[in-house]
Protein backbone atom coordinates (compact mmCIF):
# COMPACT_ATOMS: atom_id res chain seq x y z
CA UNK A 1 0.00 0.00 0.00
CA UNK A 2 2.82 2.36 0.89
CA UNK A 3 4.58 1.61 -2.41
CA UNK A 4 1.45 2.42 -4.42
CA UNK A 5 0.96 5.67 -2.52
CA UNK A 6 4.62 6.59 -2.96
CA UNK A 7 4.56 5.82 -6.69
CA UNK A 8 1.35 7.77 -7.21
CA UNK A 9 2.77 10.79 -5.38
CA UNK A 10 5.96 10.60 -7.48
CA UNK A 11 3.92 10.40 -10.68
CA UNK A 12 1.81 13.37 -9.59
CA UNK A 13 4.92 15.43 -8.78
CA UNK A 14 6.49 14.54 -12.13
CA UNK A 15 3.31 15.48 -13.98
CA UNK A 16 3.09 18.83 -12.25
CA UNK A 17 6.74 19.62 -12.90
CA UNK A 18 6.33 18.98 -16.64
CA UNK A 19 3.36 21.33 -16.83
CA UNK A 20 5.49 24.10 -15.32
CA UNK A 21 7.88 23.80 -18.25
CA UNK A 22 5.16 24.45 -20.82
CA UNK A 23 5.72 27.26 -23.33
CA UNK A 24 3.51 30.23 -22.51
CA UNK A 25 4.07 32.21 -25.73
CA UNK A 26 5.98 35.16 -24.31
CA UNK A 27 9.23 36.56 -25.64
CA UNK A 28 11.38 37.47 -22.66
CA UNK A 29 14.00 40.20 -23.03
CA UNK A 30 15.86 38.65 -20.09
CA UNK A 31 14.87 36.13 -17.41
CA UNK A 32 11.97 37.53 -15.42
CA UNK A 33 11.22 40.39 -17.83
CA UNK A 34 8.48 38.86 -19.97
CA UNK A 35 5.90 41.65 -20.17
CA UNK A 36 4.50 42.17 -23.64
CA UNK A 37 1.88 44.74 -24.58
CA UNK A 38 -1.40 43.54 -25.98
CA UNK A 39 -1.91 44.02 -29.71
CA UNK A 40 -2.87 47.63 -30.41
CA UNK A 41 -1.07 49.05 -27.35
CA UNK A 42 1.06 52.05 -28.45
CA UNK A 43 4.86 52.17 -28.16
CA UNK A 44 4.63 55.61 -26.52
CA UNK A 45 1.92 56.05 -23.88
CA UNK A 46 2.22 59.85 -23.70
CA UNK A 47 -0.47 61.44 -25.82
CA UNK A 48 -2.36 58.21 -26.45
CA UNK A 49 -5.70 57.12 -25.04
CA UNK A 50 -3.77 55.18 -22.34
CA UNK A 51 -2.07 58.34 -21.03
CA UNK A 52 -3.34 58.96 -17.46
CA UNK A 53 -2.74 62.76 -17.74
CA UNK A 54 -1.99 63.29 -14.04
CA UNK A 55 -2.49 66.75 -12.61
CA UNK A 56 0.74 68.07 -11.02
CA UNK A 57 -1.21 69.60 -8.11
CA UNK A 58 -2.83 66.25 -7.33
CA UNK A 59 0.54 64.51 -7.39
CA UNK A 60 2.08 67.07 -5.01
CA UNK A 61 -0.69 66.82 -2.41
CA UNK A 62 0.91 63.88 -0.61
CA UNK A 63 4.35 65.50 -0.51
CA UNK A 64 2.80 68.68 0.88
CA UNK A 65 0.83 66.81 3.55
CA UNK A 66 3.97 64.93 4.61
CA UNK A 67 5.85 68.24 5.04
CA UNK A 68 2.98 69.60 7.15
CA UNK A 69 2.92 66.41 9.24
CA UNK A 70 6.67 66.64 9.88
CA UNK A 71 6.30 70.29 10.94
CA UNK A 72 3.55 69.34 13.43
CA UNK A 73 5.67 66.49 14.79
CA UNK A 74 8.64 68.84 15.19
CA UNK A 75 6.44 71.25 17.15
CA UNK A 76 5.19 68.41 19.36
CA UNK A 77 8.74 67.18 19.96
CA UNK A 78 10.05 70.66 20.88
CA UNK A 79 7.16 71.11 23.32
CA UNK A 80 7.78 67.65 24.82
CA UNK A 81 11.50 68.31 25.37
CA UNK A 82 10.72 71.67 27.03
CA UNK A 83 7.80 70.65 29.24
CA UNK A 84 8.15 66.86 29.54
CA UNK A 85 4.45 66.56 28.65
CA UNK A 86 3.25 65.26 25.28
CA UNK A 87 0.44 67.27 23.70
CA UNK A 88 -1.10 65.79 20.56
CA UNK A 89 -3.16 68.79 19.48
CA UNK A 90 -0.74 71.35 18.03
CA UNK A 91 -3.31 74.12 18.56
CA UNK A 92 -2.96 73.68 22.35
CA UNK A 93 0.81 74.13 22.31
CA UNK A 94 1.82 77.64 23.39
CA UNK A 95 4.59 79.11 21.27
Image (cartoon, rainbow, N blue to C red):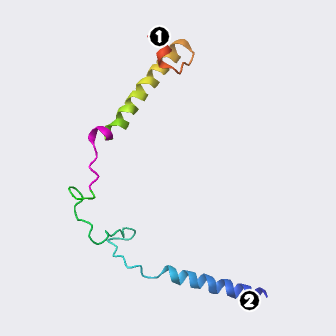
Q: Position of residue 6 (x, y in %)?
A: 71, 85
Q: Mark 2 points at which residue?
A: 4
Residue 70: say if magenta.
Answer: no
Q: Position of residue 31 (x, y in %)?
A: 38, 71
Label 1 crowd (10 A; few <14 / some 14-19 / many >=20): few
Rendering quarter of residue 12? bottom right
Q: Which of 37 and 76 is in front in this view?
A: 37
Residue 56: say if magenta.
Answer: yes
Looking at the rendered structure, the number of numbered marks drawn on it comes to: 2
Residue at screen point 61% across, 81% down: 13
Q: Position of residue 90 (x, y in %)?
A: 47, 19
Position of 20 relative to 72 (above/below): below
Answer with mark 1 or mark 2, whichever residue precedes in sequence: 2
Rendering quarter of residue 11? bottom right
Residue lying furthest front: 49
Please tell me whether mark 2 sits on a helix, a strand or a loop.
helix
| Residue interval drawn in magenta | 51-58
Main secondary-structure element of the magenta-colored stretch: loop
Q: Mark 1 points at which residue?
A: 94
Please tell me whether mark 1 sits on a helix, a strand or a loop.
loop
Q: Nearer the viewer, residue 95 or 7?
A: 95
Q: Is the N terminus in the top left, top right, bottom left or bottom right quadrant?
A: bottom right
Q: Position of residue 89 (x, y in %)?
A: 51, 20
Residue at screen point 38% across, 30% down: 67
Rendering quarter of residue 35? bottom left
Residue lying furthest left: 47
Could you tell whether 78 is left or right of 6 in the image? left
Amino acid sequence: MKKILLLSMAALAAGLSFSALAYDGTNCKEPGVCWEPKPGYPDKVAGSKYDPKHDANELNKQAQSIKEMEARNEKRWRNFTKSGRFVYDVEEIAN
